[in-house]
Amino acid sequence: MNPKLDLLYRLADDQLILGHRNSEWNGLGPILEEDIAFSSMAQDKLGHSLQLYMLLHELGEAEPDTVAFTRNTPQFHCCQLTELPIGEYDFSLMRHFLFDHAELLRFEALADSSYEPLALVARKVKGELKYHVLHANTWVKRLGTATEEAIERMQAALEFTLPYALGIFETTEAEPEIISSGLFIGEVELQRRWEASISKVLAQTSLVLPDLRLLTPVTGGRHGQHTEHLQPLLDEMAEVFRLDPTADW
Amino acid sequence: MYGSASTHDIPNQATTGLENEDPILLAEFEAHIARGEKIEPTDWMPQLYRKQLTRMIEQHAHSEIIGSLPEGTWITRAPGFRRKMAQMAKVQDEVGHAQLLYSAAETLGKTREQMLSDLINGKSKYSNVFNYPTPTWADSNVISWLIDAGAIVNQMANAKGSYGPYCRALDRICAEEAFHLKYGHDAVVHLATGTPIQRRMMQEALNRWWPAIMTFFGPSDKMSTHTEILMRWKVKMATNDACRQQFLDMYVPKIWEIGLTLPDANLHKNEDGVWEFSEPDWEDFKRVINGDGPCNAERIAVRRAAEENGAWVRRAMQQPQARYVRPLA
C-alpha cells in the first residue's frame, strides 16, 4: 500500500474505534464526571479520525462516512487494543493511559511530518491529546496510590493491557518508506519514547511496570486481523447508516 | 432535557406542617419571595419548602441521567460522523445537567450519594417518559426535539422561581437546551423529508411517542391539587395544563408543517384558542410511574450496575493518602 494511505488508515482507524468505545461509557461511569470526560475524549477522537479520513479522501479514497461506516473487519487497520470492549473502569482507564501516551507522542512527531497536510492536522490534534494524557495521568496516579483494592485492580489491568498496547507499534511493509520519506519517525522510535513516558508516571504510583521484553505483543490489527469484538462493533455502528447508505441522514 | 412537572407534585399530606414553623420567619420568607428576590442556601426556609425543592431538583437530576440512556444507546449507532458527534455532545450535555442539578440539590442538605441511592432503590422518581423504549434512530430524534422542547417550556418557567441555586442551574441548562432543540428539529426534518424508509421511520416513532409526550407535563390540573402553596412560594411556576397548552401551541403546527401527522383525531385548537385533545390514559401513566412500564427495570438496572461497578473507584477517591493530583494543565 502507498505509505501515506498505510499510515493514515492506521491513525484514523485507531481514533475512530477507540472514540466509539469511549462513547460507550455514557451512563456507566463510576462518577458522573467520568461519563462526561470519556464523552469529551470520544468526541475529540471522532473528530481526529474525521480529519484523517478527509486527508484520505483528498488522496482519492471514498468519503469519510463511506470509509468509516461501510468497511468490514479485514479492511480495518486499528490495533487490537482499541477494539476490545470497555470492560470495567480499570481496563478502560489503563487502555486510555497506555494508548494516549503513545498517541500524544505520535502526533507530536507527526507535527514535523514531511507531508504538510498531515503535519497541519497533527499540530491541532496534539493540543487536544495533551488533555487526554493529563486526564489519564491524574486518574492513574490517584488510583495507583489509593486503596489496596484499587492498586490491585490497576496492576491487573496494566498486566492484561500491556501486550495489546505493544501491538500499537506493529509495523507494516510500508514502514521503511514511511521513515525514509520523512512522513513519520517510525514505530520503533515511538515505542522507545512511549516506554520512557509511561515509566515516568508509573514510577509515581505503587504500580509495577513488568519487563516489556518478556511480553509477547498482540499484533495483527495493522494487517486487518482482529479480535472477535470488532465486527459486532462495526455492525452496530453501521446499523442505521446501512438502512440506506445513499440517504442523507 | 429533561425535567418535567409530572414527577414532583406535592403529596397530600404536604400542606400540613406549616403550623410548626415560626410565623415571623415564615412571613419574612414569604415577603422575600413576593418581592421577587431569590432564596439562597443559608437563608431561613420552611421545612416544606426545603423538602419540596430537594425532591423536585433531585427528580430533575435523575431525569437527566436516566434520560441520557434511551438516547445514549443511539450514540454507537448514529448514522454518519455528523450525527454521531452531535448525539454524543447532546447526551453529554444532559449528564452535565445532572451534575449541575445534583450540586444545586446538595445545597439543600442531601448528598449526591444519598440521591443516587434513593434512585436505584426506587424511593425517588424521574420523568416517566424515559420508561418507554427507543426502538429506532427516529425515536431518539423525537426525544431530542419534542421531549427537550417540553422540558424547555417547563424549565423556562421554573428558572423564574424562588430558589437561587436551582434558577441559576436552569439558566445554564436552558441555554444548552436551545441547541438541543435545533439539533432535534434538524434530525427530525431530515427524516420527515427524506426517503420513504426515513419518513416511515419518523412517523412511526412519532406515533409511538405522542401518548407519552401528552403526559409529559403531568396530570390535568383538575386531577392534581395542592399546588397553591408551591405556586405562592414560586417552587412551581406554571400549572401542568398551562405548560401543556403552551407546548401544543408551539409545536403542533411545526409538526404538521413538515408533513407529519399526530395519532389523535380529536387534536385541534378550538374557537377560544385552546387546544383540545383526547384525554391521555392517566391510569396507564400511574401504572408506569409506579414501576410497571416497559423499561423501568432496565433503566434502574443500568444505573445500579454503574453504581456497583464504580464503587471501588469512589472508595479509592475517599482515601486520604491517595496522591492528590491537580488535574489542571
Image: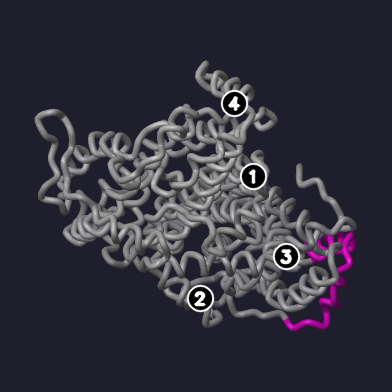
Q: Residues within 10 Å of mark 1 (few under 14, many from 20)?
A: some
Q: Which residue is mark 1?
A: A123
Chain under callout 1: A
At a point 30% along the width and 34% down the height, the residue shown is: B242
Q: Which residue is mark 2?
A: A230
Q: Magenta stretch: residue A202 in it?
A: yes
Q: Which residue is mark 4?
A: B26
Q: Position of residue B308 (x, y in %)?
A: 64, 69
Q: Which residues are magenta?
A: A192-216
Which element carries disc 2, helix, strand or loop?
helix
Q: Nearer the viewer, residue B75 or A195?
A: B75
Q: What kind of residue is marked 2?
A: Leu
Q: Is residue B249 left or right of residue A202?
A: left
Decide: is B11 above or below B288: above
Q: Nearer the viewer, residue B29 or A189?
A: B29
Q: Magenta stretch: residue B157 in it?
A: no
Q: Which residue is mark 3?
A: A98
Q: Position of residue B316 (x, y in %)?
A: 79, 62
Report if residue A183 is visible in the image.
Answer: yes
At a point 17% along the width and 49% down the height, the residue shown is: B278
Q: Residues within 10 Å of mark 3 (few under 14, many from 20)?
A: many
Q: How many marks?
A: 4
Q: What kind of residue is marked 4?
A: Leu
State whether discs 3 and 1 lie on one chain: yes
The mark closer to the camera, 2 or 1, is 2
Q: What kind of residue is marked 3?
A: Leu
